[in-house]
Image (tube, rainbow, N blue to C red):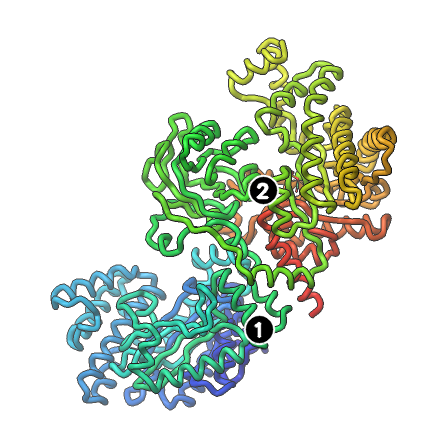
Amino acid sequence: MAKYVYLFTEGNATMRNLLGGKGANLAEMTNIGLPVPQGFTITTEACTQYYEDGRTINDEIMAEIMKYVEIMEKINGKKFGDLKNPLLVSVRSGARASMPGMMDTILNLGLNDEVVAAMIAGNPDPKFERFVYDSYRRFIQMFSDVVMEVGKKYFEQLIDKMKEEKGVQYDIELNAADLKKLAEQFKAEYKKQLGQDFPSDPKVQLYEAIRAVFRSWDNPRANVYRRDNDIPYSWGTAVNVMPMVFGNLNNNSGTGVAFTRDPATGEKKLMGEFLVNAQGEDVVAGVRTPMPITEMAERFPEAYADFSRVCNILENHYRDMQDMEFTVENGKLYMLQCRNGKRTAQAALKIACDLVDEGMRTPEEAVLMIDPRNLDTLLHPQFDAKALKSAQQIGKGLGASPGAACGQIVFTADDAEKWKNAGKKVVLVRLETSPEDITGMKAAQGILTVRGGMTSHAAVVARGMGKCCVSGCGEIVMDEANKKFTLAGKTYHEGDVISIDGSTGKIYDGAVPTVDAKVEGEFGRIMSWADSFRKLHVRTNADTPRDAKKARELGAEGIGLCRTEHMFFDPQRISAFREMICADTKAEREKALDKIMGMQQGDFEELFEAMEGNPVTIRFLDPPLHEFVPTEEAEIALLAEVQGKSVEAIKAVIQGLHESNPMMGHRGCRLTVTYPEIAVMQTKAVIRAAINTKKKHPDWKIVPEIMIPLVGEAKEFSYVKKIVVEVADAEIKAAGSDLKYEVGTMIEIPRAALTADEIAKEAEFFCFGTNDLTQMTFGFSRDDAGKFLPAYYDTKIYENDPFAKLDQTGVGKLMKMAVTLGRSVRPGMECGICGEHGGDPTSVEFCHKIGLSYVSCSPYRVPIARLAAAQAAIKDRG
Ligand code: PEP
Ligand code: MG
């Protein structure tokens, strides 16, 4: 039979999965002899069972809980509902990973009218009476709010009214009679709201409270927090039932929270706050201003000395910065919680390095202590944390590209450029972005879009640029034509100021000041340790020399994906490219391609230069051609003029490019099959650029990797490869060079993964395009799925956006199969990934596990991938 309940004496720190973080640490603190009120933990499995049983606690589990209530009563010499020695408890959530403030807590449970009367009768001190009624009114309020979901506000209104009547400012100034009256009013409010009496049986109270904590695992804020923090829904929460100790007993009592090191900077010093005559929630709720912990040293010297001793014990025991909750009851210290404290990225790096220097941790352990996702904040300008607290949030989209941006709203790429040139800072707000917006995106401080997911054009391009972007904020009601939108009930016009946070996806009204991110010394230290442990190489997705240089600075070991089409979006080039698209004959097409070739060659040379002899993978033209043609009448007319054609003829070409499913249409290698001259031009540009660079830097290893997109059939790849090889070999021969090059393929169509052994006979390397592979495996569009995915999160069909976090079960299975099949034909074959997942930590770990050679991600994610790759390797070694 499963065991669902554990006394604190029965557990330990290693039982986190079963007991949750809080439960495991309460057990551990008990084991090492620290003062912990002795209670029990109901396991996370009981929570899972609660959901399996249709949100009820079954009889077996309930019976076990009641058995442990009796044991707890014996241990503490108090009894539930007893009139001599009543037991009061706290009921607290505690999941495997800490989710601060996301789930529910109930304090002072066990009180009812009789218990209250008996407690008061047993202690003649008038202050004690006040304390009892204070606890009672707190309990009724919390139970009503948390368990029965009666809004907190009704009770707060009653408290405010009472304070007003008494002419006082703080709760603490209310006397016993006031609090007694409040308790009565609260019970009446409860009845009014719910049509039933407040439950007086402590066992009923307990049952309901436990149920409420289980239920809170599924509350909306917990669900969002889990998605943001990679915490699976299946884990469930444990529940901790612990005898109360009272920080609100008298002025020789109080409650506090503290960190053993500064969670903002990492500095080694005790940080925290203490509130006299109060219970835990008062500190968090900010009812009164607590005193700094240093002041506690003067006012409660004994309890403070005891507490500092406990802090040292805990830090040495867990070998990490601790975040603790404690209570002093009548001068005596009790520990209510400890956990590894949450910290800023900067603090995380400093603490990890300090712990190594203090001999507490090895470099491997230090590397494992850093959450790779947090590094983001070190690489981009950030909102000033203090200013953010008072900023007014007006909406939320996807945190598509990290950073903080603040500026005046503009609605077109053109305006973004014009305003920037006039010295203004702008945020570009678009329904969605298209390749034509690129210069406007560059000019803007940040980009906000109504539509589009994590792999939408705006998101991919913004990440590449290291530009802040919030995408897919569907709450915006857009009126692009009139240059305005409505959000949170307010209409925003061109020129109004907003601020957007590309890490959290939050949108704020007005200007929130930013501060520059600094890359401090510890960052480099952790990164060099990470590099020494990882097996995966880390490359970057870069299309411009600027991105490539940035990525090198951040440690990229090559380019894993250069999307050559991005080079055509430049205004000077797009016209030549459009000429190519609108050409009627091969000769006309070649003429237009000739104009582009020199520019492409120049770009490639700069990329080779920036990569200093590291691998460079160049992907041939991929998107459907309609993405390049103009949509505005004026531009169409201009194109007709340049081409010497009629507007109608141009419109007919544009019309002809229309497809019902462009993402499954005439794109990728299909373009080469129909227009081989495009691949001919691109091959010449790559090979000539490589030969030139090799001449300039004979000591560099220049072996260009030519990558063919969207292959689904071995013969299709062979056909394209043949064209590439003929042109490349002829170029090399003509130049009298001995240049080596490789021709490989993207694996981004399920059929390519399924037939990877066939394809590997010709393809010299594989690179997984998991954006398309995800799209085609799931069968939904990467650009449109954002519309319905939220419903999938709500219903728990999916827990994460499969375009942001690799679907290891399905897409991952195809990848694993393709690697195995490919290497069965071509042993040791280089296999990488260049979809967005290449910069996502859990996806990187998966790539390590299936033996990929490298991950490639946007420049600002390179450090994240380096760290994630190191963590995967360290975990793998055990
Ligand atoms: C992909 O599909 O994963 C990929 C990298 O190519 P793109 O995003 O350019 O389609
Ligand atoms: Mg693709």
Residue at 30% across / 71% down in the picture? Answer: 290
| Mark 1 neighbour class, 10 Å CA radius: few under 14, some 14 to 19, many 20 or more | few
Whole-percent x and y of residue 222? Answer: 45, 59
Q: Is residue 840 above or below residue 140?
A: above
Q: Quadrant of the N terminus?
A: bottom right
Q: Give the label, 1 or 2, closer to the camera.
A: 1
State the image quarter where residue 708 is shown.
top right
Q: Is mark 1 within 8 Å of ligand 1?
A: no
Whole-percent x and y of residue 150? Answer: 30, 61
* For residue 695, side relative to residue 788 (left or right): right
Whole-percent x and y of residue 800? Answer: 56, 52
Q: Look at label 1 and name its amino acid.
A: Asp
Q: Which residue is mark 2?
A: 464
* Residue 357: image tag: 1
Q: Is residue 719 visible?
A: no
Q: Look at label 2 and name its amino acid.
A: Gly
